[in-house]
Image (tube, rainbow, N blue to C red):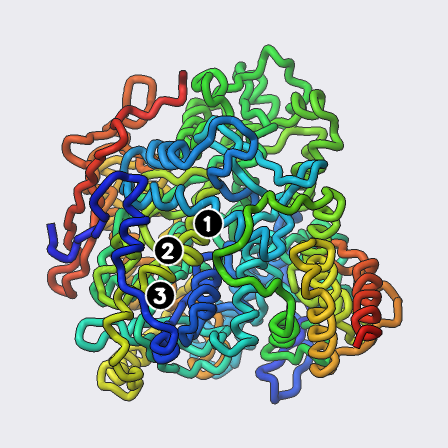
């Protein structure tokens, strides 16, 4: 184990770790906070909440986003809800149960200490959001309503129609706006971070490209917080926003920050199926739909054929001819099994020839039973905007005919390795939200991403960052004319010039789509040794071709969207290779990482706790040595390790 | 499907723009409007590649620059004026949710950026919406610090109030209402936030202060007044009602009377 990999999990009983840690870490006095600068990159739930909370504490904060406004960050697209252990429905929920569900849902590949803390602060988040004026759904008595999500047997998900992410982000964005108005936070929009600058081994600033003018700009600080989200767009087609990218975390990796579990990507079971080659992105249909929707395919191949030829409608297939395969295979959890399980089950049915559309890659999500039970009005109240969204895209009315869905890349559990303080292996460099690897193990439960982003930003980072900043109260402001900034800026300019000067024959999207196909085919929902090795070879070849045959129209000193995409795809190509290497190394199946060689007789994941109960922590050791893996062993002191069972 | 596209091209805020005409062929009706633009951009990029290779010196226009991100109607990034309508010829959607099946084969489609004094063009179809952030920064929030707040269920809120607040909070900040308004008024956008917070007990505490600050900022930034044409409501992708403008006016008057 590398000596840098000290997780710093506090000693003591699980429920006392965070309290004990908070009482032991240092704090910075208000007078000294004013002297300290913090850079926050990204303005999703993690970034916006962190920037706001740090501004409230009195630090000088600079916050950066690639869009025209902090409110556009992709957290806004989260639909279904946010988990918390409030136990308002009186269904025997607790901090411990939320903790346990999350550890189990992650297939025992996350840290007990981190996950327990997440569950512990979950309740504070709901209080905070309500105080900010987030219009959560309510009962007629005026109190908050809850619904269920996958991987849990209680109702602990708070929601604001199908726009929970939007409402939480508007809350955090409001808090951020308040600090901008008060002058404690400065906001920089349409800026993309292209490198982190280290001075004496510590993160002291960033290099950004002004996306409007093309100018390269330098910003210094006493600490840098990365909150730039995940890297699902490696796959080209994903539910991520078009501009979501991995460049910030990837540049941190290249500067020495370790990368945890890069191959752990989540495939979401309920997305609108791919319709053709011209498609640019995939649309998610919220997991909350599985509360009232039932997933099925026909039992008989004849019906499948007729459906594909559009000779019959799904609604014409009789009840006894339908295979509700999740209810059949997983009686205890039914349609609410975790995402990885539901995705694989859909793939299994489609591979067996039961896919219900022309491409054979779709299953039904049906509301018939619920509409009969509850009435159309109730369903409309619960999911109206999702039904409308579905109809706009597909031209099919889901009140009459079931939705067609298929799994798609949605979230990445892997990310920058962080310790209990959310600090990466580079001192002064922090990573929060989806950008870090810490809380979800091999699979994230639904409605937990919002919880983690806000937990990190509002309630964890503002405490832990003080511990290291307390040692910097005498440190002068960072001089952006330091040679380290000069050097980083020169490297970025050289890279951009090099990209623009290739003048080859293929567009950025050509390479991105090719990479996406390789990743989906070999490092997607099912992986095997041969396939992954093939992927590595193909990605390497594609990378060479990219640097020889890319064409970018236009120039650097202007708003140039093709250039923006090119810098991102250059990084995706390298990250894709690392993901494949990690998938190859991990010869076990766990959570969303399914190695075909490692499965039980009935096709479930087979973990190898003996050999793989660790975090795969990758280090970039330079051009020659490349990517090296270290291991952070996972110790389970409080939870009994078991095989995940959603059957009974 | 084939289309003739008349697209607004403008190199930068300082330069003058004009319409350029392009032909596009074999588009599937299931293609989204932005995917159609992706295909156009691919064509324009190919032209650029050929002009380099052949060295004819024939200049390609280069791809059309437009704002987009989530492509599922929630981020509010996309902002196109299509055949004279904000977000194009369909109701209750953003541009990214528009599909080509809503057009006729062979149709000419005019594509422009938002046009409003408060939102100047940056390049091609991209406008500067910074003013919207500035209005919200002036007071579009509840002034509470992180932590130290009461339990979420301490104050019951009537369901109907919470629902109406949510109706207003659905605003994605795209700016369609402003682009559509003949006065370049931002009233629907501003009122959505004012009204959403005013309906909740948490937001009531500083409702008067908020509405005054936000209206003052809106006026300062040069947005026009409301003359009740309700065009904003028609084009709002989230169907936000002008009744929120009424509530904002009431809030504003009450706040001013007390001054």
Instruction: Give the left or right position of residue A538, taking residue A99 as reference.
Output: left
Q: Residue at x 39, y 82 (%)?
A: A217
Against B197, residue B227 (above or below) is below
Q: Nearer the viewer, residue B252 or B201?
A: B201
Classify residue A90 by image quadrant: top right
Q: Earlier in the sequence, mark 3 or mark 1?
A: 3
Q: Residue at x 38, y 73 (%)?
A: A30
Q: Are marks 2 and 1 on the same chain?
A: yes
Give how far across and how far down residue A486 sits, in percent: 26, 85
Q: Residue at x 70, y 73 (%)?
A: B214
* C-alpha distance separating marks 2 and 3: 13 Å
Q: Earlier in the sequence, mark 2 or mark 1?
A: 1
Q: Provide the residue designation for mark 2.
A: A460
Assign a secondary structure to mark 1. Answer: loop
Give how far across and how far down residue A369 sits, in percent: 65, 21
Q: Which mark is residue A237?
A: 1
Tell me, yes or no, if residue B28 can be seen here.
Answer: yes
Q: Provide the residue designation for mark 3.
A: A225
Tell me, yes or no, if residue B3 can be seen here.
Answer: no
Give how far across and how far down residue B225 sits, in percent: 82, 76
């Amino acid at each position: 184990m590398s000596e840098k990999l000290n997780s710093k999990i506090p000693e003591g009983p699980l429920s006392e770790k965070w309290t004990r840690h908070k009482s032991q870490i240092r704090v910075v006095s208000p007078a000294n906070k004013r002297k300290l600068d913090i850079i926050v990159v990204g303005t999703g739930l993690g970034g916006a909440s962190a920037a706001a909370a740090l501004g409230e504490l009195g630090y000088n904060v600079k916050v950066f986003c690639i869009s025209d406004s902090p409110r556009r960050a992709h957290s806004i697209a989260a639909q279904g809800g946010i988990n918390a252990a409030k136990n308002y429905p009186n269904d025997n929920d607790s901090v411990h149960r939320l903790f346990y569900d999350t550890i189990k849902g992650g297939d025992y590949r996350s840290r007990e200490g981190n996950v327990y803390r997440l569950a512990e602060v979950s309740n504070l988040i709901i209080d905070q959001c309500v105080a900010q004026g987030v219009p959560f759904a309510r009962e007629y008595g005026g109190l908050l309503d809850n619904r269920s999500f996958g991987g849990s047997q209680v109702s602990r998900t708070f929601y604001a129609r199908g726009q929970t992410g939007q409402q939480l982000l508007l809350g955090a964005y409001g808090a951020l706006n308040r600090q901008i108005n008060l002058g404690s936070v400065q906001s920089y929009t349409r800026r993309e971070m292209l490198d982190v600058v280290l001075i004496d081994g510590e993160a002291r600033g960033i290099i950004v490209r002004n996306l409007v003018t093309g100018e390269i700009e330098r910003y210094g600080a006493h600490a840098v917080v990365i909150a730039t989200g995940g890297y699902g767009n490696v796959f080209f087609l994903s539910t991520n926003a078009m501009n979501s990218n991995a460049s910030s975390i990837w540049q941190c990796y290249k500067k020495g920050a370790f990368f945890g579990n890069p191959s752990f990507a989540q495939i979401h079971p309920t997305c609108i199926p791919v319709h053709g080659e011209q498609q640019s992105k995939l649309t998610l249909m919220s997991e909350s739909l599985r509360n009232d929707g039932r997933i099925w395919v026909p039992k008989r191949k004849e019906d499948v054929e007729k459906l594909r030829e559009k000779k019959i409608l799904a609604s014409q297939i009789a009840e006894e001819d339908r295979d509700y395969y999740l209810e059949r295979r997983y009686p205890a959890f039914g349609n609410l099994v975790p995402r990885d399980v539901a995705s694989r089950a859909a793939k299994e049915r489609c591979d067996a020839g039961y896919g219900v559309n022309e491409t054979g890659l779709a299953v039904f999500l049906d509301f018939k039973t619920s509409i009969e039970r509850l009435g159309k009005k109730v369903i409309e109240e619960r999911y109206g905007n999702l039904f409308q969204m579905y109809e706009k895209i597909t031209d099919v009315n889901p009140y009459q005919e079931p939705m067609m869905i298929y799994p798609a890349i949605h979230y990445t559990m892997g990310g920058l390795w962080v310790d209990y303080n959310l600090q990466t292996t580079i001192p002064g460099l922090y990573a929060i939200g989806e950008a870090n690897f810490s809380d979800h193990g091999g699979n994230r439960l639904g409605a937990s991403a919002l919880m983690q982003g806000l937990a990190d930003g509002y309630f964890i980072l503002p405490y832990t960052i003080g511990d290291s900043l307390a040692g910097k109260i005498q440190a002068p402001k960072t001089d952006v004319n330091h040679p380290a900034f000069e050097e980083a800026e020169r490297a970025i300019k050289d890279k951009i010039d090099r990209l623009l000067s290739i003048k080859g024959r293929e567009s950025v999207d050509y390479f991105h789509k090719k990479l996406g196909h390789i990743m989906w085919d070999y490092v997607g929902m099912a992986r095997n040794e041969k396939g992954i090795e093939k992927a590595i070879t193909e990605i390497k070849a594609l990378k060479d071709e990219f640097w020889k045959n890319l064409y970018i129209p236009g120039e650097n000193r202007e708003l140039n969207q093709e250039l923006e995409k090119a810098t991102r795809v250059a990084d995706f190509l390298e990250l894709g290779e690392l993901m494949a290497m990690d998938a190859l190394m991990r010869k076990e199946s766990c959570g969303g990482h399914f190695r075909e060689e490692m499965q039980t007789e009935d096709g479930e994941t087979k973990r190898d706790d003996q050999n793989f109960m660790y975090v795969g922590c990758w280090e970039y050791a330079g051009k020659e040595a490349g990517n090296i893996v270290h291991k952070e062993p996972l110790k389970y002191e409080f939870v009994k390790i078991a095989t995940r069972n959603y059957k009974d | 499907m084939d289309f003739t596209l008349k697209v607004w091209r403008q190199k930068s805020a300082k330069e003058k723009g004009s319409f350029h005409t392009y032909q596009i062929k074999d588009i599937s009706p299931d293609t989204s409007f932005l995917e159609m633009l992706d295909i156009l951009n691919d064509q324009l990029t190919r032209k650029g590649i050929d002009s380099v290779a052949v060295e004819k010196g024939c200049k390609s226009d280069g791809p059309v620059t437009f704002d987009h991100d989530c492509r599922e109607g929630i981020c509010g990034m996309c902002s196109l004026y299509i055949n004279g309508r904000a977000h194009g010829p369909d109701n209750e959607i953003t541009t990214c949710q528009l599909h080509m099946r809503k057009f006729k084969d062979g149709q000419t489609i005019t594509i422009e950026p938002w046009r409003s004094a408060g939102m100047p063009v940056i390049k091609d179809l991209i406008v500067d919406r910074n003013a919207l952030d500035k209005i919200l920064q002036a007071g579009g929030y509840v002034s509470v610090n992180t932590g130290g707040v009461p339990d979420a269920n301490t104050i019951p809120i009537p369901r109907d109030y919470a629902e109406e607040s949510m109706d207003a909070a659905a605003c994605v900040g795209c700016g369609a209402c402003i682009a559509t308004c003949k006065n370049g008024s931002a009233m629907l956008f501003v009122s959505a936030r004012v009204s959403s917070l005013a309906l909740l007990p948490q937001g009531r505490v500083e409702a008067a202060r908020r509405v005054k600050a936000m209206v003052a900022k809106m006026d300062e930034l040069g947005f026009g007044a409301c003359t009740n044409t309700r065009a904003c409501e028609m084009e709002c992708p989230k169907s936000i009602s002008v009744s929120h403008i009424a509530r904002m006016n009431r809030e504003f008057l009450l706040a001013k009377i007390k001054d």
